[in-house]
Image (tube, rainbow, N blue to C red):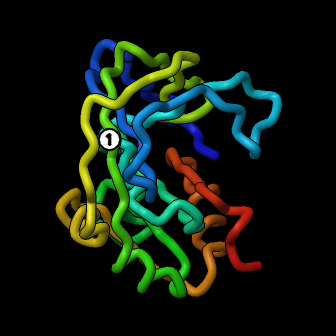
Amino acid sequence: MSRAADEVPAPHIDQVTTVYHYSEDGSIRRFSPHVPPTNPSHPPAVWAIDAEHSPLYWFPRNCPRISVWALTAAQQEVLTATFNTEASRICAAESHWLTRVREASIYRYSFDASSFAPWTEADGQYISGDVLYPDAVDVLDDLLGLHAAAEVDLRFTPRLGVLMDHMLASGLPFSFVRIRDARR
């Protein structure tokens, strides 16, 4: 689940030249549209994300994770005051995932963004109804280092609930991924 900031429009597809799909499977050669099990009413699509939102996917697939970020100076003030950070993005996962995140390798599939349209239900996400072939595949084997290099405030916590509540209450743009798999 993701929500766009009301005050800042999402980047137009013309500004995004490359989009990415992240997977623990490095052998995908052809991407076919499919209906996601979590959204059975959605038409079949191939899903991708822009570079700005990629830290949301620098995790093993089934790892529950949450993120909040700032797009403007005013939002940065809220993010800093609410979450005690100087970063412009926070990503958090459950503590028992730390070893798996540390040891995981994921693959970044790159696509020409002109084959995709923005998915209006989530910031930075794009969809295509076509069968697509990636332009490049890169292995990413230091997920902690990726977050650090992107200056993401990466947090691990026993449970995500309280932090999720603060993210929702902040009014900032956020995303929750694989929350159905989170500890209750």
Q: Name the residue at 54% across, 87% down.
A: 96
Residue 132 found in image quarter: top left
- Expressed as whole percent of the image width and height from the top left, the position of residue 77 reads 35, 54
Residue at image location 37% in from the left, 47% down from the top: 54
Q: On the rendered structure, is 91 left or right of 178?
A: left
Which residue corresponds to the image point at 81% horizontal and 35% vertical from the top-left? Answer: 40
Q: How many marks?
A: 1
Q: Alpha-carbon neighbours of circle 1 within 10 Å: few (<14), some, or many (≥20)?
A: few
Q: Which residue is mark 1?
A: 52
Which residue is nearer to you in this view: 46 or 63?
46
Q: Relative to 123, does residue 152 appear above or below in the rendering?
A: below
Q: Residue 148 is drawn in which quadrant?
A: bottom left
Q: Secondary structure at mark 1?
A: helix
Q: Residue at x 37, y 23 (%)?
A: 11
Residue ranking furthest to the left? 149
Q: Say whether residue 132 is left or right of residue 80.
A: right
In the image, taking residue 45 as reference, residue 144 lies left or right, namely left
Q: Position of residue 71 (x, y in %)?
A: 36, 40
Q: As drawn, which residue projects farthest toward the right?
A: 41
- Left or right: where does residue 158 sit relative to residue 88? right
Question: Residue 184, can we see it?
Answer: yes
> Residue 30, located in which quarter of the rendered image?
top left
> Disc 1 marks which amino acid?
Glu
